[in-house]
Amino acid sequence: MQPCDELRDLVLGNYEKEGAGKVLEVVKNTYSHQEGAIVVGTDPNEWFEGYDAILHFYEPFGSYQLEIMVKILKAYTEGSAGWTVDQGHGQAAERRETPNAPCLRLSPGGRCLGVRA
């Protein structure tokens, strides 16, 4: 397992896009359609397996402008697989704070996933 600046930069770029109200664009352009794509949130009920489930989870956020403040962001690769984990918090445009704990991003086929709950 090796640190991966490319994945880290992709996640940071996605946070910028989410800040511009492009949450669904990030999901549609970044998340894997391959079997095995999983988003794990901070709540035991936040387990979304497969692209359709991931997209459905994010649809309510639509064009919200999210400001993400990252405390910790780590990104790694091994062979064709990559994953990231982050810790921080986000705020929507109306400044309602939403805490984020670490969550996992996986792609067995080598395509990056990027989510936090």
Image: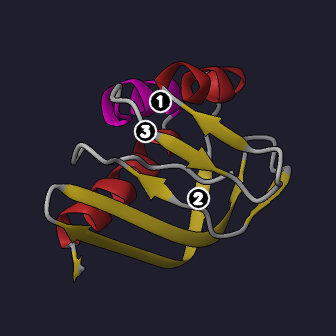
Predominant secondary structure in magenta?
helix
Magenta residue check for 7: no
Check disc 3 and give the amino acid type. Gly
Q: Which residue is mark 1?
A: 22
State the separation of the CA atoms marked 1 and 3: 25 Å
Query: Quick check: 39 above or below 9?
Result: above
Disc with the residue nearer the chain's start (1 vs 2): 1
- Image quarter (top left, top right, bottom left or bottom right) of the N terminus: bottom left
- Kindly identify the amino acid type of the residue bearing the numbered disc 2: Ile
Q: Secondary structure at mark 2?
A: strand
Q: Position of residue 46 (x, y in %)?
A: 75, 45
Residue 36: assigned label:
3
Of labels 3 and 2, earlier in sequence is 3
Residue range corresponding to the magenta coloring: 21-32
Q: Residue at x 41, y 65 (%)?
A: 84
Give how far across and how far down residue 109 sits, in percent: 24, 43
Relative to 72, is 101 above or below?
Answer: above
State the CA–CA distance, disc 1 to disc 2. Answer: 13 Å
Task: Spot the residue most to the left.
Answer: 79
